[in-house]
Image (tube, rainbow, N blue to C red):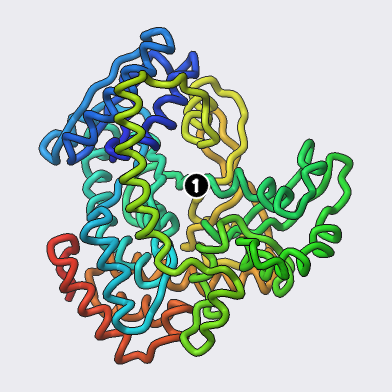
Amino acid sequence: MKITFMGAGSTVFARNVIGDCMCVESLRDSVFALYDIDPVRIEESRVILEAIRKEKGGFGKIECYTGVENRKEALKGASFVVNAIQVGGYDPCTILDFEIPKKYGLRQTIADTLGIGGIMRALRTIPVMDDFAKDMAEVCPDALFLNYTNPMAMLTGYMLQHTPINTIGLCHSVQVCSEGLLKGLGMEDKLDGRKELIAGINHMAWLLEIKDKDGVDLYPEIKSKVDAYIANPDNKDKVRMEYIKNFGYYCTESSEHNAEYNPFYIKSKYPELIEKYNIPLDEYPRRCIDLIDSWKKEYAEMLKNGIKEHTRSKEYAACIMQSIVENTPYQIGGNVLNRGHIIANFPEKACIEVPCLVNGNGIIPCHVGKIPTQCAAMNMSNINVQLLTIEAAATRKKEHIYQAAMMDPHTAAELDIDTIKKMVDELIEAHGDYLPKFN
C-alpha cells in the first residue's frame, strides 16, 4: 500500500499523520511518499520520519519527491493522499492577506477560513489542488484524498464539486470542542462517558447536544456558568461563550477564529470590544513567526539529542485509513457536500461538517436534519462566501471575487462596496503569479 503526503515540508503535521500510521500494524508496512516543492523542508521531514520508522521496528519505506515535475510519480498508485499544503507561505502571501486589508481599515485575526484573507488563500490554493486532482485521476483514481488545508470548506467543496476525486475534509476542532468547553468551565467531572452531537460547517460546527454518561443534558449547567466566565478579564474564549448566550450553542473552533466570521466583534467604531473579548488582532502572522522560530530550535534539539518516541495524535487520518483497510467501524467529524440535504436547512452545494461513519465501504455521512434556525443563519452567512469563492475559482470571473468579499459578514460591516472592490484589485495584483488570471 502507498500513502502519499502532499506538503510534507509541514514537518510537524507530517510527523503526526505519518507517525500515527507507523503505529498501526495494518498501515506500518506501507510506502510513505513525501512530496513538497521545498527540498530543505522535505529533508527535515524525512530525517524525523526515518527515525520514527526505525524506532517502530523498521517497517515500511519512505520515499521523497520534490518539485512539480515529480508530483505525478509521488501520487502514482497511492491508496490514500493526505494534503497539507500552504500555497504562497507566510512570506509573501500571509503577509499580503493581512497588510493590504489593514490599509483599508479591515483588521483580521487568523484569515485562513473566511474573510478576505480566507478568500485569497482559497483562490491561490484551488488551482494547485485542481492540478493534484488531474494527476490523481490519471495515476491513482481510486485514492481517498484527505484534505487538511484551509480554508477547509472552500477547498474541500471545490474538490467535491469540480473534480472526480473521492475527498474528505478533516480538522481537529471537533475532537477537542466539548473537552475544551467543559474544562474551561470547571466541569472536568463530566468528561468521562459524555455524549455529543456536532454539526454545521468547518470552524463553526455547533455543539447541538452534550450529555453526561447518564444522558443528562449538560447545557443548563453550562449556561449557568457563562456570565462568570465572560466577566473574568483573563479568560480567552469569550466569543464562543457569547455564542452560547446569544445563539444557544457553543461551536467548534476557537474564539480568535470566530471573532472574524461575523460582524459583531471586530468593529472600528467600537474599539473597546477588542479588549472586552480578548480578541488577538494579527494573531496568525505572529503564530507563523513563532512557529518558524520554535521549529528551528526543536529540529536542532532533535538532531542533537535524538527523536522522541512517537505516540498517536488526535488527528483523524490514520484512524480513517485503519478503519477502511481493516473494515472496522469508526466515527469522525468530516467535511462533505450536503448531498441529499444531510443538514436539511442548508443548500446541497454547501460543504458541511457532520458525523460520518467510516468502515471498509469508505466514509458515510450521517443524516442530521434541521439545525436551529439561528445557527443555520450564522452558518449561511459563511456558506454564501464559500460558494461564491468556489464559483470564482471555477469560472475565473473577478466579479465573483468581489461578490464573495461583499457578502463576507465582517468585510461588509466595515467597508463600502467601492472600497471592497479596490481592496480586492490590490490583493489580486499583489499576489501576482500565485493567482490565475481572472476576467
Q: Quadrant of residue 392?
A: bottom left
Residue that badge 1 annotates: 171
Q: Residue at x 83, y 53 (%)?
A: 218
- Name the foreground residue: 161 vs 377: 377
- The residue under the point 41% across, 71% down is 108
Relative to 242, residue 299 above or below = above
Considering depth in this image, is 108 or 417 the residue closer to the camera? 108
Q: Is residue 382 above or below residue 176?
A: below
Q: Position of residue 66 (x, y in %)?
A: 16, 34
User: Residue 48: horizontal and vertical position, in percent?
Assistant: 33, 24
Q: Estimate how packed mark 1 is, as few (under 14), some (14 to 19) or many (20 or more) residues with alpha carbons within 10 Å.
A: many
- What is the secondary structure assignment of the residue under circle 1? loop
- 419 relative position to 383: left or right: left
Q: Name the residue at 45% across, 47% down.
A: 169
In this view, the residue farthest toward the top is 57
Residue 129, given in percent of the width and then of the height, sits at 27, 49
Q: Position of residue 231 (x, y in %)?
A: 72, 70
Decide which of 177, 65 is in the foreground and name it: 177
State the residue lying farthest toward the left. Answer: 69
On screen, residue 122 versus residue 218, left or right, reads: left
Residue 69 in the figure: left or right of residue 192: left
Q: What residue type is disc 1 on?
A: Cys
The quarter of the displayed image where residue 303 is located: top left
Image quarter hosting the N terminus: top left
The image quarter containing residue 390 is bottom left
The residue at the point 33 percent across, 36 percent down is 297
Q: Is residue 52 left or right of residue 324?
A: left
